[in-house]
Image (cartoon, rainbow, N blue to C red):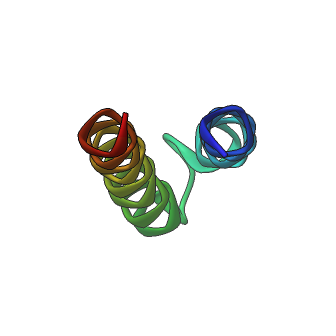
Amino acid sequence: MSTQIDDLVDRVVDVAENYRGSDRDDIAIRLFEVERSLHSARRNLQSALRAFS
């Protein structure tokens, strides 16, 4: 699952970069918020996996 989250982060960042500095910079801002949330989800997932190990 961590690998899938990493792949999703990469895809979200790629799209966000396309909007950065454009007249739709608001989309980039929201996508970068999604990126931060995905990083948090990955950390939480890793923590849960350590707890079960």
Q: Residue at x 44, y 51 (%)?
A: 38
Question: Considering depth in this image, is 5 or 32 the residue closer to the camera?
Answer: 5
**Does residue 46 appear left or right of residue 17 in this picture?**
left
Question: Considering depth in this image, is 37 or 26 the residue closer to the camera?
Answer: 37
In the orientation shown, which residue stands out farthest toward the front?
Answer: 53
Is residue 34 depicted above or below 38 in this figure? below
Q: Residue at x 74, y 43 (%)?
A: 4
Is residue 30 depicted above or below 33 in this figure? below
How many callouts does the rendering have?
A: 0
Question: Considering depth in this image, is 49 or 20 the residue closer to the camera?
Answer: 49
Q: Residue at x 39, y 48 (%)?
A: 45
Q: Position of residue 49 (x, y in %)?
A: 39, 41
**Does residue 9 appear left or right of residue 44 in this picture?**
right
Q: Position of residue 40 (x, y in %)?
A: 28, 47
Q: Residue at x 32, y 47 (%)?
A: 36
Question: Considering depth in this image, is 21 or 34 the residue closer to the camera?
Answer: 34
Q: Quadrant of residue 52?
A: top left
**Does residue 16 appear left or right of residue 18 in this picture?**
left
State which quarter of the image contains the C terminus. top left
Q: Position of residue 25 (x, y in %)?
A: 46, 57
Q: Position of residue 21 (x, y in %)?
A: 49, 41
